[in-house]
Image: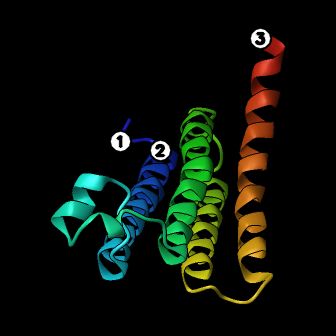
């Protein structure tokens, strides 16, 4: 498996994306602490009282960014892994993985920093292109065997 250049490239970019998701989770926790907005009563009690058992718009923005990552990165992990088994061109595959990774990083930055529209939407759309390409190639490769 480690001789498969495509899979190695996929592993590299996937790991970057997973680390990015961890960073967003940490940021969410830090914003919760800074804004004193806790999701659980026991956390609020530990940090000042039940009045801090509440929602905050900044915390919710971080949570939406994280949820959006899960909705998009998890399918990429599946598609990229299967695509890697199809023996695609290593250069073309690397371009697919790079575009998705950069798109998701830009999307997160745009989400968390509230950059002007349509930055986030464009980043989302660009990141979807390699996913659709990989999905189509997987379907084309598997349809004859269905």
Point 57% across, 37% down: residue:
78
| Quarter holding residue 74 | top right
Frontmost of labels 3 and 1 is: 3
Mark 1 highlights which residue? 2
| Quarter holding residue 20 | bottom left
Q: Quadrant of the N terminus?
A: top left
The one of 75 and 97 positioned closer to us in this rendering: 75
| Mark earlier in primary sequence (3, 2) | 2
67 vs 5, left or right, is: right
The one of 56 and 74 positioned closer to us in this rendering: 56
In the rendering, at what x and y percent does residue 106 appear?
Answer: 60, 77
Asked if marks 2 and 1 touch (Cβ < 8 Å), the reply is yes
136 vs 103, left or right, is: right
Count of marks, rendered view: 3
Mark 2 highlights which residue? 7
Number of residues whose C-alpha sits closer than 10 Å to that of mark 2, classed few (under 14), some (14–19) or many (20 or more): many
Point 56% across, 65% down: residue:
65
Q: Is residue 121 visible?
A: yes
Secondary element at tag 3 = helix
Real-space CA distance between mark 3 and mark 2, rounded to the nearest whole angstrom? 23 Å
Mark 3 highlights which residue? 145
In the rendering, at what x and y percent does residue 10 appear?
Answer: 49, 51
| Mark earlier in primary sequence (2, 1) | 1
Asked if marks 3 and 1 touch (Cβ < 8 Å), the reply is no
Q: In the image, is residue 142 above or below residue 62? A: above
Real-space CA distance between mark 2 and mark 1, rounded to the nearest whole angstrom? 7 Å
User: Which mark, residue 66?
Assistant: none
Question: Please, which residue is most extreme toward the bottom here?
Answer: 116
In the rendering, at what x and y percent does residue 142 appear?
Answer: 75, 21
Real-space CA distance between mark 3 and mark 1, rounded to the nearest whole angstrom? 27 Å
Point 54% across, 50% down: residue:
70
């Amino acid at each position: 498996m480690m001789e498969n250049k495509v899979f190695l490239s996929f592993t590299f970019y996937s790991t970057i994306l997973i680390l990015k998701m961890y960073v967003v989770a940490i940021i969410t926790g830090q914003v919760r602490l800074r804004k004193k907005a806790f999701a659980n009563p026991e956390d609020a009690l530990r940090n000042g009282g039940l009045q801090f058992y509440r929602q905050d718009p900044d915390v919710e923005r971080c949570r939406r960014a994280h949820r959006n990552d899960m909705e998009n990165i998890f399918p990429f992990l599946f598609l990229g892994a299967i695509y890697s088994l199809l023996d695609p061109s290593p250069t073309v595959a690397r371009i697919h993985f790079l575009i998705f990774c950069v798109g998701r990083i830009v999307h997160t930055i745009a989400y968390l920093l509230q950059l002007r529209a349509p930055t986030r939407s464009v980043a989302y759309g660009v990141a979807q292109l390699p996913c659709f390409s990989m999905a189509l190639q997987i379907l084309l490769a598997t349809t004859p065997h269905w």
